[in-house]
Image: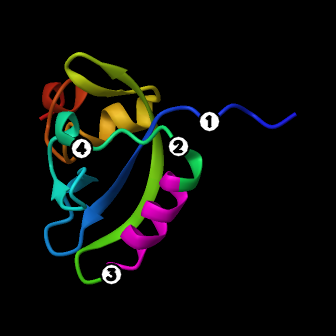
Amino acid sequence: MPREFTPKVITANALLEGDVVYLTEDDGWTRTLSEAAILTDEADAELRLLLAQSRASDVVGAYLADVIATDAGPQPTHFREAFRRTGPSNYFHGKQAETR
C-alpha cells in the first residue's frame, strides 16, 4: 500500500547567494518559510518541483521537504530543514565559541 502524501514545500538554494529559498504560491522565491506554498496534492507537488528544478538560473538543488501546516505557516518536520532555515553554520556559537 502506498504511503499517504504529506504536506510539503519546495526548497532550494539561491544560485548567487546560496541562501535557502522556498517556492511561493505565485512561483516566486522567498527566504521566509512562512511565505512558502504548502503543497498537499502529490501530482501538483511533482509538477511544481519539475518546474522549480528547470529554473537553473535562479536556484540549485530544488527538492520537496515535509512540513506541518500551522497558523504561523509551514513548520519543518525534520531537523535538517529546521537547521537549514537558520542560515549558515559557519558562525562561532556554542562549543565553537568557547574554544576561541
Sequence-earlier tag: 2 or 1: 1
The amino acid type, in three-letter code, at marker 3 is Ala
User: Which element carries disc 1, helix, strand or loop?
Assistant: loop
- Residue that label 3 marks: 56
The amino acid type, in three-letter code, at marker 4 is Ser
Nearest the eye: 16 or 73: 73
Query: Which quadrant does the C terminus fall into?
Result: top left
Separation of residues labelled 2 and 4 (CA atoms): 33 Å
- Residue that label 4 marks: 89
Sequence-earlier tag: 2 or 4: 2
Nearest the eye: 25 or 33: 25
Residue 34 locus on image (x, y percent): 19, 33
Q: Is residue 23 left or right of residue 46?
A: left
- Residue that label 2 marks: 41
Separation of residues labelled 2 and 1 (CA atoms): 7 Å
- Residue that label 1 marks: 5
Q: Depth-wise, is mark 4 or mark 3 nearer the camera?
A: 3
Residue 36 vertical placement versus 22 (above, below)? above
Separation of residues labelled 2 and 3 (CA atoms): 24 Å
Q: Depth-wise, is mark 2 or mark 1 nearer the camera?
A: 2
Q: Which residues are magenta?
A: 44-55
User: Which element carries disc 3, helix, strand or loop?
Assistant: loop
Quadrant in the rendering for residue 56: bottom left
Q: Depth-wise, is mark 2 or mark 4 nearer the camera?
A: 2
Separation of residues labelled 1 and 3 (CA atoms): 27 Å
User: Which element carries disc 4, helix, strand or loop?
Assistant: loop
Query: Which quadrant does the N terminus fall into?
Result: top right
Q: Residue at x 62, y 36 (%)?
A: 5
Q: Depth-wise, is mark 1 or mark 3 nearer the camera?
A: 1
